[in-house]
Amino acid sequence: KQNEILEGLVQERTKDLRMEKEESERLLHNILPEEIAAELKLKGKITPLRHNDATILFTDFKGFTATSATITPQELVNELNDIFKEFDFIMEKYSIEKIKTIGDAYMAVCGIPKESNTHPIQCVLAAFNMVSYLEKRKETAKIKWEMRVGIHSGPLVAGVVGTKKFTYDVWGDTVNTASRMESNGAPGRINVSANTFNLVKDYFDTEYRGKLAAKGKGE
């Protein structure tokens, strides 16, 4: 009788542990790309890597600071959550890795950690989807958000930083240039760098905007 009781307790505890492990892995995969999470579980650490070819996508909203001052905190969070949930879905659709949101800015990368020969095309297609979604949303939404999109392709470094609330992040001049593409863009339009243009020009209609002064980079 005692053995039966002990076996029952062991089985119950094993089930609990399995459920806890599954929940931990689910949360880990929400934070890190699948390949990075697997490396962390195997080695207990992540090796930073230099990637020679990737594309960064940046977005933000025109007049966000002014608009956010006119609505309640709950309305603001609800708006961002509603929009960013759709953006997350679009990233998944085009196999793009979301990196983070910073206020109203949304940052994603394609070509890492999974390599892709079509990473700039994937980012442009995703950007079109994002712009189209916001245009459609305007038909019924109280706030008519207008978004800038900037895209740049090039080398970067990727890795995980921190021990608490750690994040998968990317660094390098490619990230900075993508940010400049976004800040110098026009609402409702997709602003790509010369690097990205050379990779996508056979697939999309583009318009040359001339040279722009970019902080720390000249023209």
Image (cartoon, rainbow, N blue to C red):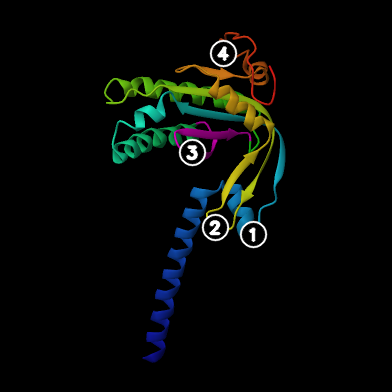
Which callout, 4 or 1, points at the residue further toward the start of the chain? 1
Q: Is residue 7 left or right of residue 177?
A: left
The mark nearer the N terminus, 3 or 1, is: 1
Crowdedness near tag 3: few (<14), some (14–19) or many (≥20) residues, C-alpha within 10 Å:
some
Q: Secondary structure at mark 1?
A: helix
Where are the magenta residues, as a range? 94-111
Alpha carbons under labels 4 and 2: distance apart: 42 Å
Q: Which mark is residue 101?
A: 3
Mark 3 or 4, nearer chain start: 3
Q: Amino acid at mark 4?
A: Phe
* Cα–Cα span, label 3 and label 4: 27 Å
Residue 110 is a magenta residue? yes
Reading the image, the residue beneath label 2 is 164
Residue position marked by numbered label 4 in the rendering = 204
The residue positioned 64% from the left and 54% from the top of the image is 39
> What's under tag 1, amino acid-wise?
Leu
Q: Nearer the viewer, residue 125 or 219?
A: 219
* Picture quadrant of residue 114: top right
Dominant secondary structure (helix, strand or loop) of the stretch shown in magenta = strand
